[in-house]
Each structure stands twice: as structure tokens, then as C-alpha cells.
Image (tube, grey):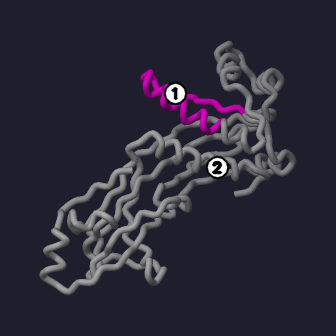
Amino acid sequence: MRFTKSAPLLLIAAVATSCVSFELGTIKTNVASTSEIVIAPELKALLQEIPKPKIVIRIPNPPSNVTEAERFNSYINVVEKLFVQQGYTVRDRALLENLMRSGNVYYKSIKDKIDTDLIVDILALRFDGTVDVHKFVNKTTQKEEPFATEQTYVQCPVASLECRVTIVDRGQLGGLFTLRASPADSREYNFYVDGFRQNLAWAGQESSGLFPVLRLLIETEDMKLDLTQVLTRRLIELLSGGRG
């Protein structure tokens, strides 16, 4: 995670020319609450009957670029691994792909040949979303407080997982999910806020200056893998006994 900033004001100059106080704050996006979840009654009934159904992961539109395809496959491996660790039976997705390529495939034949309850289509996994947060948690008061103007905010990255769940023995759409997560909701990123609530500085980087906008960026594969795990755990919750 890299921090970037804009419109610098020297912190040393600000302190020297005024008696402005500084407060330590952190940020929470709560983007998980913006997730879009649609679950059909039939899927809820199935999950109540079979709390850990057998699943197969499908990727309807894999990246065409070889490097991107390999990277995307590493994320899907994380998804499958977490399901297995939670006690799910995860069928080999290559079996489904080969069956689909053979043509004239009916859901009954998928059920008979692969023995799976659900097909989970990964429609998209993105890491390029953002959300501008105009409030912060004051570390002293432990209360959420607003910045002074709309021009002061922290921009946080947002990862999203879009998937479709099909009930195999019915050939029926069981659920559509768009799940969202931000590293700011699982990690603490501290910064200083001036007394006017207009300018900010990352804790530990105060000497670099004050800025009306701070930005967090996802720049490593490890961060993307971590966010993939967060999103997958949420998906597992939704596919566990009908919760969610």
C-alpha cells in the first residue's frame, strides 16, 4: 500500500506561524455495507438443507492476456483454497470446462458427471475502485467526526468480487453478488488532522507537509491476495446455511 498526496503545505511552516493543534485520526470506509446481494428463496432452502454444498468455480470470461490470466488464476486459487479450508467439497473446475466445451451440455449431465450442487461463476474481480471518505475516527474521543469541507478527504481503494451462483439440479439462478472491501476496514491507517479539520498528514510522515487530500493505493500482489481472501470469506458466509 502506497500513500500519495496532493497540494502540499509545509507542516513545519504551519506550526511555526500558528497555534493550530493536531489530532490523531484513522479512517473507516465501511464499503462492505454497499455490497449488492440477491439470493433466491430456492438457494436459501438448499443452503438450509445442505449447509456446505459441493461447488465448482467457473470463470466465464478469463483474461485473454497470458500474464493477466496467470495472475487472475492465482486469485481464483485463493478462492478455492479458502472454500476447501472451510470444509467444502470443491470440484475441479477443469472438469466443468472440458464438459462445457464438449457441447450439448445440460445441467442434469453436469450434476451426474461432476456431482456438484452449485456452480459459482466469478464474473469479475477488480481492485481499481475508490471511495472518498469525508469523516474520520478521532483516536482521542473514539468518535466519528467530519472534515471541515468537501475538499478535504481520504481516498481509499475498493476491491470488488462479482459472482453468480447457479443451482445445478434445477438449472436455476440462485444468487447474484457484488461484494466490496477496502483495506482501510481491516487495517489501521493513522494520520494527523489540523485543528481546522482542513489538512492532513500521515502519521510518521508529518515532516513532508499537510495536504487536503490523502490517498491510499494498492500496489502489491500481496495486498490483492489479502483482499481476495476478505471477499471470499464474505462469499463463504453467504453460502453457509443461507446466512446473509
| SS assignment at label 2 | helix
Tell me which amino acid carries mark 1. Answer: Pro
Q: Position of residue 121 (x, y in %)?
A: 62, 35
Q: Which residue position is annotated with label 2? A: 233
Choose between 60 and 186: the one closer to the eye. 186
Q: Is residue 66 above or below residue 229?
A: above
Choose between 202 and 128: the one closer to the eye. 202
Residue contact at pointers 1 and 2, CB within 8 angstroms: no
Tell me if 6 is positioned left or right of 78 in this view: left
The residue at the point 44 percent across, 82 percent down is 140
Tell me if 148 is positioned left or right of 41 in this view: left
Q: Is residue 172 visible?
A: no
Residue 36: which quarter of the image? bottom right
Tell me which amino acid carries mark 2. Answer: Arg
Q: Position of residue 198 (x, y in %)?
A: 26, 75
Residue 155: which quarter of the image? bottom left
In the image as oriented, which residue stretches furthest toward the bottom? 19
In the image as oriented, which residue stretches furthest toward the right? 49
Q: Position of residue 221 (x, y in %)?
A: 45, 39
Q: Is residue 15 above or below residue 107?
A: below
Alpha carbon separation for disc pair 1 and 2: 22 Å
Magenta stretch: includes residue 25: no
Residue 62 is labelled as 1
Q: Is residue 100 above or below residue 175?
A: above
* Boundaries of the magenta span: 56-80
In the image as oriented, which residue stretches furthest toward the top? 102
User: Are there few (<14), some (14-19), or many (20+) residues within 10 Å of tag 2?
Assistant: some
Tell me if 6 is positioned left or right of 68 in this view: left
Q: Position of residue 124 (x, y in %)?
A: 52, 38
Q: Is residue 86 visible?
A: yes
The residue at the point 41 percent across, 79 percent down is 145
The residue at the point 47 percent across, 55 percent down is 183
